[in-house]
Amino acid sequence: MSAEALPPGLAPRLIAFCEELRSEGVAVGTSEILDAFEALEAVPWTDPADFREALASTIAKSQEDRRVFELIFDRFFFRAAEAEAVSREIREGGDGAGSERLDPDQLRQAIREAIAENQESDMRDLARLAIAAFGRRGEGSGVVGVDVQRIRRTLGLTPQAPGNQDAEGPPIDREGINRFERHLRRELERGLIERTEKLPPARPLADLDRTLPTSPSQDLAAVHRAVAQLKRRLATLGHEQRGRRSNSIVDVRRTMRASLETGGVPLRLRHRPKRPRRPEILVLCDVSTSVTSASVFFLSVVHALHDSFRKLRSFVFIERISEVTDVFEDERDFREISRKISQEGGVADISGYTDYGRVWREFAEEIADDLHPRSTVIVLGDARTNGREPHAEIFAEVTERAGRTFWLNPEPKLYWNYGDSVMAAYERHCTAAFECWTTRHLEDFVNVVAGGRVRED
Amino acid sequence: MAAAPTIVPDSVTDVADGLRAVGYLPSESASLVSFLATKLGKPVLVEGPAGVGKTQLAKSLAEYLGRSLVRLQCYEGLDEAKALYEWNYRKQLLRIQATGEQEAWEDIFAEDFLLTRPLLQAIASAEPVVLLIDEIDKTDQEFEAMLLEVLSDFQISIPELGVIESRTHPIVVLTSNNSRELTEALKRRCLYLWLDYPGVEREMEIVRLHAPDLDEALARRLVEVIHMIRQLDMKKPPSIAESIDWARALLLLGAEDIDRSMFERTMSIIVKHRTDIDLVSERVGVRLAGALGSEQAEATG
């Protein structure tokens, strides 16, 4: 219960751990570190669960922080243990897999079952077996990420829609595969450390890892919160404020009244207040294969928008464009909506490749007449044309007619304009373009939309 | 209340057992954080969806530790006069009228003329208390800033009287539904606990603890249905308290199984929103009928 109960090496370790958390953007203050030490004196630190909880409750002060904490905790103490093992020259006996050779089909079957039943320890063992069977340890590429993907592909682990269940065993989802990949990665790293007897440099967390796992209800709630904010902002600052005073009407009565202060000389002009106009929004959402991972997020954004705005029209597109306003208005449940859209969206195309040029043409022909300076167009898409004509000039016409155009791109800015992405051609015509694949980005978008253009009054 | 001696727990399991004894089944992290709160004397910030027992945790903690509970319910526009203290103007006026003005100035700003509000009450209490600041996210940031002094030093400064320091160390529990981001400064001073809906097993235990006469199979079915409902995208998912209410209602009705008609009759206990009712009866009601049908098929076949 006193300070000397803590082993001597722990303090520097913990501080190093907090350093690592800081480098990942968790704000760990000195007071938090002190709290952590105090907490560790109060609980038996030999119990792994208590140890972790005590640290988490004193250091990670929000759910997002907690998520990063878990990832870093695992990584840090895994690496620390491995470093210790290297320095003491401890090795795990044998390759573990030599004795029982499973043939690939059996192995695949076993992995599927382990993932379906969520058996972490089984997954770990199977990951080692898989590495032994496929990874060709001696001649692996040496790059862990490459090896993980190679093994996953050889095993034929792909997420399945619940509909087309084949005889391979229970269906597995993306989340399950991710978990298995984590085990693979860890075991590969362990092998690498054992071979080279030194630790590889730590990589920063990927953005996608640190976002909360997509449990639909939680994510939806966050998206809805951000969109509700967007609604307030859009409602109070309309396009008409760009012109500011230039064409506002002088309020004679109020001007005269104000002139009383200055002895009847109307020094200060008073203007009639402008009514905020109700915004009209048109959302265009790409649902093609290149944005599969993002389209769930996008659809939830559209879903949330529909919840907040009455004057909203939504469209989905791949090769052609199709209005889905009705689907969103009739149906509340999100999963049902995504099913309906994928089945009856009217965009079911042969190739499944986006044709932005054609989409703009159709949009311009059918809908552009309804556009006016009050409308806001929001495009959710990756601007990957698959080599087809982008027809940026038609897009320019559309943006011309609309008051404001925003583009939300699910790819990091780094990838824009690489390959078949023609983001630059479109970005020129937009009021603004944002990268957007997490709710945090969505909030940023909301802030930028509002930023600096606060109502005068 | 004064007769019950206050308990000082020695270990995490003590807290877990103690909370269990007063009818609250804590998760591992909940008992650990509660234990740390008693040990370190730091406030606890509890976040989580509505209806997972955040407020109840504070109440049970008070009951287990034998402390009285002081509760401050937050709302928009809550100010210091409602949370901290207020001068009793009428009494002060009377005093001034009763005595000469000169003498009165001396003593109308004394503790006798102070109306204590929850925060001051918790700080000044002679007995150790549990202070529950409920739904802190409903207040504005100014109020949060005011709380900082109370939470870090357990003292309140009253300009006319000086600083009132706490005589005993209160255990402070703050709850938040996350409707707005709390300030870093406040978070920094707190231990953080995220409460989520319990898993099937633990919720089973909770339901059976509060409705002990309920058949085990039925309780399991009930909890499974509740979990199914929580999966849906609802305006207000059913809370733990509502599953307990539902269990009690089923007991009263003498239900033996949750079939479709029973579900539709009692659904209003767990679902309290018109659109949610439509959604739930459409999704879950149908599935229940299906399950019942297959059971009957098995029974006859």
Image: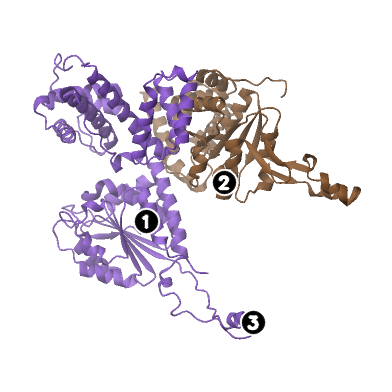
Chain colours: A purple, B brown
Q: Position of residue B34 (x, y in %)?
A: 53, 27
Q: CA distance from mark 3 to mark 2?
A: 42 Å
Q: Nearer the viewer, residue A5 or A111?
A: A5
Q: Earlier in the sequence, mark 3 or mark 1?
A: 3
Say the numbered circle drawn on residue B145.
2
Q: Tell me whether the residue at label 2 lies in contact with that at label 1, contact meaning CB atoms closer than 8 angstroms.
A: no
Q: Amino acid at mark 3?
A: Leu
Q: Nearer the viewer, residue A381 or A75?
A: A75
Q: Position of residue B301 (x, y in %)?
A: 35, 23
Q: Position of residue A94 (x, y in %)?
A: 16, 15
Say the numbered circle drawn on residue A260.
3
Q: Nearer the viewer, residue B215 or A150?
A: A150
Q: Judge whether residue B211 can be spotted in this image.
A: no
Q: Left or right: where does residue B208 sit relative to residue A68?
A: right
Say the numbered circle drawn on residue A445.
1
| Residue visible at 31% across and 49% down in the picture | A437
Callout 1: SS: helix
B21, above or below A242, in the image: above
| Residue visible at 35% across and 51% down in the picture | A441
B157, above or below A176, in the image: below
Q: Chain of mark 3?
A: A
Q: Nearer the viewer, residue B19 or A29?
A: A29
Q: Are marks 2 and 1 on the same chain?
A: no
Q: Left or right: where does residue B3 sit relative to residue B18?
A: right
Q: Left or right: where does residue B32 sit relative to residue B127?
A: left
| Residue visible at 13% across and 31% down in the picture | A142
